[in-house]
């Protein structure tokens, strides 16, 4: 596999009409692989938090949001930023701290935003982005403008009091915020049961009268349909909603995977796009849903067909 | 003569009430005592919302920054500066990220907070060092000690893109407000000068202006003339007015009633000493010391006799 030749290409977003959300989802996997390989080569000074295993969730959010909407992200924003970018190069350039990066080389990885792509703000501080999202939504109410604010958080960040405060604040003031919880069962290396009791988000949302939906299984069609439905409800009712996605993070917390010589996790583009146990990999599930021919059409176009 | 709090409220409300696309919010903002008078006289309009909010100060701060990013002029009224310690993450991290970003049509975010340091609110309500918040977050703050400062700061800051904190003293709430006859200021509101003298420059930080006023008056009674200035913790300050005055008098007394280690008074004393090595500089700083069971943090402003002795001045009581 000649990674150098792929990186030398224009790395443009796949044409949506031709390849649809499935194509985009596969492309997100490829782009993450490329970043992971570059991380192995120590090409960047900044740490990057990849999201192998979250491609279905990210694609669903990307599909459900309109051009009027904005995204407010966490430190694990790399794959979301990829989804909203026209090309991978400005992201790579940002990680290289170059002026041609999306943040002019000043935001790095964990704070990377791209207003032109609808990513308004990303925070490296757990829970920090949630109240900022509420403020952005308040601005939309004061300077009447359509669209919603989608605030992404995780099962670690939602342990912060900021999560509860923001749910209450958004509901109290009728703010158009779609809260998205990416529950990958990890806060760095601690699983939920290793650090806290279970938090039943549905009950929490019910307590403050916020619609809630739990999604798991990585079925792209279901994910997109449900996210669109909740996005519509937020926009029409002038009131927040919350979705929890159960995901399986396939990479290390930050940096390359493997992260050290004896790391049991292995991700290598030379092994192909898929990673590990097929029952946990959303791209493997997508391949099964699409069938080999359709999947190969996408991978061929991406220049990685021989790998699959 | 107007009372301090009444006048400051009138000035701030006047500027807030002229904002468009504004979110004006706070806990118990529009009811009860109106935050002891701090938030009286605010009016809503089609594009200016007055919003009473729940008790979640961290979120209030994040909301202000989000609204600012969305092009809105946000003004948060806060009963006590202490509460804003819960927002430090946003002051430090969120605003730093915003400043590193290219945001079109950036709005403004202003926090108006009262400072309680009379000493009888209990040990958990004694934070009075606005400068410490400003230093940690590298933001601008302004202690409003008189009507002229307040008007100048409010006019310049409340609708300006970006973030700042305006603080007023609850300790002075019922006092008659100082209304200077003359006012010179640096363009960034880091320095104000109310009178010019030739024998001593009295430079007041935080809420020490009342002490400086008394000393300046006492200097006059001894046949001496003092310059009287106040300084604010401003990001990248323009100290030229301060240094010009120090060069003229050759003697600088810095008063700082903020509780804490070092701080603005210390910084100002250092800056003057380094820039004007021939100048005699004396810093009178509130102690940062707190022992269990005993509060030793009172601000002891020097008497005129001590000041004269310190600077080798010979005055004759007129």
Image (spheres, coloured by chain):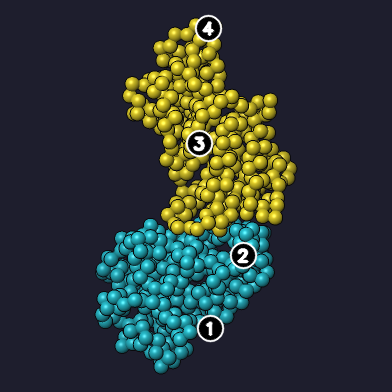
Chain colours: A cyan, B yellow
Q: Are marks 2 and 3 on the same chain?
A: no
Which residue of the protein is positioned furthest toward the right in this rendering? B32
Residue identified by numbered label 3: B189
Above/below status of A172 relative to B230: below
Question: Which quarter of the figure has residue B34?
Answer: top right
Say if labels 1 and 2 share a chain.
yes
Camera-nearest label, 4 or 2? 2
Tell me the distance, in whole angstroms, between the alpha carbons under discs 4 and 3.
Answer: 35 Å
Which residue was labeled with disc 4?
B317
Q: Is residue A267 left or right of residue B168?
A: left
Residue at 47 percent across and 8 percent down: it is B315
Q: Nearer the viewer, residue A273 or B77?
A: B77
- State the CA–CA distance, disc 1 to disc 3: 58 Å
Q: Chain letter of disc 3?
A: B
Residue A221 badge: 1
Q: Quadrant of the N terminus of chain A?
A: bottom left
Left or right of residue B273: residue A140: right
Work out how far the residue at label 4 is from the one at label 2, CA to CA, in angstroms: 68 Å
* Vertical comparison of B177 with A101: above or below: above
Q: What subunit carries mark 4?
A: B
């Amino acid at each position: 596999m000649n990674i150098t030749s792929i990186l030398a290409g224009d790395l443009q977003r796949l044409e949506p009409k031709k390849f649809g959300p499935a194509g985009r989802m596969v492309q997100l996997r490829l782009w993450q692989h490329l970043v992971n390989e570059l991380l192995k080569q120590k090409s960047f000074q900044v740490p990057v938090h990849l999201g192998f295993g979250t491609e279905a969730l990210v694609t669903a959010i990307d599909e459900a949001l309109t051009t009027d909407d904005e995204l407010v992200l966490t430190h694990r924003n790399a794959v979301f930023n990829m989804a909203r970018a026209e090309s991978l190069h400005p992201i790579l350039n940002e990680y290289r701290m170059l002026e041609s990066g999306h943040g002019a080389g000043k935001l790095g990885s964990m704070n990377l935003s791209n207003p032109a792509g609808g990513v308004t703000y990303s925070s490296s501080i757990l829970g920090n982005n949630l109240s900022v999202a509420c403020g952005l939504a308040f601005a939309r109410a004061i300077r009447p403008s359509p669209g919603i604010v989608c605030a992404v958080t995780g099962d670690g960040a939602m342990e912060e009091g900021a999560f509860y405060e923001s749910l209450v604040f958004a509901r109290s003031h009728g703010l158009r915020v779609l809260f998205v919880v990416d529950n990958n069962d990890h806060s760095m290396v601690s699983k939920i049961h290793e650090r806290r009791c279970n938090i039943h988000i549905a009950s929490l949302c019910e307590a403050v009268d916020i619609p809630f939906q739990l999604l798991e299984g990585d079925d792209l069609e279901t994910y997109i349909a449900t996210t669109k439905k909740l996005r519509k409800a937020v926009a029409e009712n002038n009131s927040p909603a919350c979705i929890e996605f159960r995901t399986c993070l396939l990479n290390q917390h930050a940096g390359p995977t493997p992260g050290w010589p004896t790391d049991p996790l292995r991700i290598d583009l030379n092994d192909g796009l898929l990673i590990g146990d097929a029952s946990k990999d959303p791209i493997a599930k997508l391949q099964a849903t699409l069938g080999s021919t359709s999947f190969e059409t996408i991978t061929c176009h991406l220049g990685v067909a021989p790998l699959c | 003569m107007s009372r301090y709090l009444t006048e400051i409220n009138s000035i701030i409300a006047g500027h807030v009430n002229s904002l468009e696309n504004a979110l004006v919010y706070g806990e118990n903002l529009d009811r009860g005592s109106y935050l002891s008078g701090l938030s009286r006289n605010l009016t809503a309009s089609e594009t200016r919302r007055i919003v009473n909010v729940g008790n979640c100060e961290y979120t209030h701060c994040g909301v202000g920054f989000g609204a600012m990013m969305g092009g809105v002029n946000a003004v948060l009224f806060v009963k006590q500066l202490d509460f804003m310690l819960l927002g430090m993450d946003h002051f430090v991290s969120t605003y730093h990220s915003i400043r590193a970003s290219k945001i079109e049509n950036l709005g403004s975010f202003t926090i108006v907070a009262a400072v309680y340091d009379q000493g009888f609110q209990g040990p958990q309500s004694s934070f009075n060092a606005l400068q410490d918040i400003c230093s940690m977050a590298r933001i601008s703050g302004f202690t409003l000690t008189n009507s002229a400062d307040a008007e100048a700061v409010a006019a310049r800051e409340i609708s300006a893109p970006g973030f700042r904190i305006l603080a007023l003293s609850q300790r002075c709430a019922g006092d008659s407000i100082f209304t200077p006859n003359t006012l010179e200021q640096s363009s960034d509101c880091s320095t104000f000068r109310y009178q010019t003298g030739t024998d001593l420059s009295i430079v007041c930080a935080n809420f020490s202006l009342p002490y400086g006023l008394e000393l300046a008056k006492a200097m006059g009674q001894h046949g001496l003339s003092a310059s009287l200035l106040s300084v604010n913790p401003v990001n990248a300050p323009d100290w030229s007015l301060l240094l010009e005055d120090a060069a003229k008098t050759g003697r600088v007394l810095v008063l700082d009633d903020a509780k804490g280690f070092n701080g603005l008074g210390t910084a100002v004393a250092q800056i003057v000493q380094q820039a004007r090595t021939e100048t005699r500089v004396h810093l009178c700083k509130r102690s940062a010391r707190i022992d269990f069971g005993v509060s030793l943090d009172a601000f002891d402003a020097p008497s005129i006799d001590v000041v004269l002795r310190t600077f080798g001045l010979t005055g004759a009581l007129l």
